[in-house]
Each structure stands twice: as C-alpha cells, then as structure tokens.
Amino acid sequence: MTKLSVNINKIATLRNSRGGDVPNVVQVAKDVQKFGGEGITVHPRPDERHIRYQDVFDLRPIVYTEFNIEGNPIQQFIDLVLKAQPEQVTLVPDAEDAITSNAGWDTIKHKDYLKEIISEFKRNNIRTSIFVDPDLKMVEGAVDTGTDRIELYTEEFAKTYAAGDKSGIKPYAECAELASQLGLGINAGHDLSLENIRFFKENIPGLLEVSIGHALIAESLYMGLENVVKQYLKLLKD
Ligand SMILES: CC(=O)[C@@H](O)[C@H](O)COP(=O)(O)O
Ligand SMILES: NCC(=O)COP(=O)(O)O
C-alpha cells in the first residue's frame, strides 16, 4: 500500500509572500489529514524561504499521521530534526542556492558522512530515507549507509512521461527491484502529479510512500484541496 504524504512547502511560500499567516500551514496540515492524507512533508531550507524552522515545531503536535522532514543535514537541520522527532527524516543533498532539489546523493562518495548522520537519527528512533537518482550503483551504495529507505528522485521520470515517453520508468523499476532485494524501503518524490502518479505506482513494486507538493497544490487551485487529495488516494490505492 502506497502512502500519500503531502508536501506543504508551497502553502508556506504563499503565506510568506505577504507576511502574516494566510494561508495557515497548521490549518492546511490538519485539513490534509482530515481529507485522508497519510503524511505531511516539509522541507525547511536554510533561508526559510518557505517552511520556517518554527513551522516544524508548530506542526509537530498536530501531525498524527506521519511527519516527514526533508533537508540537507547541516548541523542546524540535524538539531531541528532531533528536537522535533518526526516519524521520518529524508536527507537531500541540495545546495543552498538551488531553486529546488535537483540531484540525489552520491551514496558511494558520501558513505561515511551519511552513515554517521543516519546512525544518529536511528539511535533517536527516527526512520531515515535518502534521496537518490535512479541509478543502481547509488541504490547499492545506499545499503552501506544503513538507511531504512531510499526516496527515488522522480523529476526525470516526470519529464519524459510528460513528453509522451513511458520508457523513462525503466531505471526506476530496476532500482526499485534492487532496493527490495537489498531490504531497502522505497519512497519517491519530485514532480509527481495526478497525470503521472498512477503509471508510476503501477510500475514500481513495493512503493511505500510518495511525497507530493508542487503539482498537488497547483492542481488544488482548480479542483480544491479535498478533491485533489482524494483523487491521489484513489489513484494510489485502486
Ligand atoms: C526532495 C524533493 O524532491 C523536493 O521536491 C522538495 O522536497 C521540494 O522542495 P521545494 O518545495 O523547496 O522545491
Ligand atoms: N520529496 C518530494 C516532495 O516532497 C515533493 O516534491 P514536489 O511534488 O514539490 O516536486
């Protein structure tokens, strides 16, 4: 069964564009869960351009599904996650100036670094996931870091699928198969949408969780948040 975790970064982007507290990220997270969302994802960035560190603490007590905090594990982020105690942390190697996440970890080059951070989170009973490109070597390398799960970085799939090319799923399916054989759980995210989610899910055995933000919030402008969350759930469960 694939869980839907809703990334609410874009709600914070909208709020921050005006100052003040509209829309209210805590209320949106409550509503997402009421509509059936099975997790809340946030990706606080060091410049706090969308989710602020304080948002994480405001959200923690109301997230009763699964709280997933994503980010580059700089010390400030590690401290935040250890204090907030989410159910899952997803490590993403994003540069400070990146508009959005644009690459997965080199799990071979950064094995020792990841191993150390992952073991600290696991000691604190926080499930770990690491963001990886659909590359078999990176999946193999992920095992040695001790991570519980990988998150497959789906931008390339989304791009090829939108261009009408379904063969872009192949490296993801191969990585998922290898990850399962190696005992790694499989999450996925980035640019997943109502258009492509069904095809992705159908072709990725063992897909445990998807985190979706940008498209889901954009789709909600036209169709409403409740309707959109329910459409995703239908596409993921049927
Ligand atoms: C890790 C990932 O795939 C990103 O999509 C991310 O969580 C979204 O971050 P932004 O909302 O800052 O683009
Ligand atoms: N981990 C991916 C995520 O949380 C959402 O990515 P996107 O849907 O905003 O591209």
Image: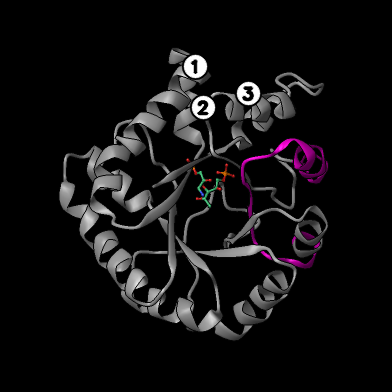
Magenta residue check for 59: yes
Q: Earlier in the sequence, mark 3 or mark 2?
A: 3
Instruction: Please say if 145 is above or below 24.
Output: below
Secondary structure beneath label 3:
helix
**Magenta residues?**
52-77
Query: Disc 3 designates what residue?
Result: 31
Residue sitting nearer the eye, 35 or 102: 35
Residue at 38% in and 52% down: 154
Cα separation, mark 3 vs mark 2, equals: 13 Å
- Which residue has dot 1 on it? 221
The structure residue drawn at horizontal position 73% and vertical position 29%, both measured from the top left corner, is 26
Q: Position of residue 142 (x, y in %)?
A: 47, 76
Q: Specify which label sits upstream in the sequence, 1 or 3.
A: 3
For residue 233: magenta? no
Q: Position of residue 44 (x, y in %)?
A: 69, 48
Query: Which amino acid type is shown beneath numbered disc 3?
Result: Asp
Asked if residue 219 shows in the view, the reply is no
CA neighbours of label 2 inside 10 A, class few (<14), some (14 to 19), many (20+): many
34 w.r.t. 235: above or below: above
Answer yes or no: disc 1 within 8 Å of ligand 2. Answer: no
Question: Relative to the observer, which residue lies in front, 127 or 195?
Answer: 127
Task: Verify CB contact (< 8 Å) between mark 2 and mark 1.
Answer: yes
The residue at label 2 has a CB less than 8 Å from ligand 2 = no
Q: Amino acid at mark 2?
A: Ile
**Disc 2 target residue:** 217
Q: Residues within 10 Å of mark 3 (few under 14, many from 20)?
A: some
Task: Give me the C-alpha separation between circle 2 and circle 1.
Answer: 7 Å
Q: Residue at x 49, y 15 (%)?
A: 224
Where residue 92 sits in the image (x, y, percent)? 57, 61
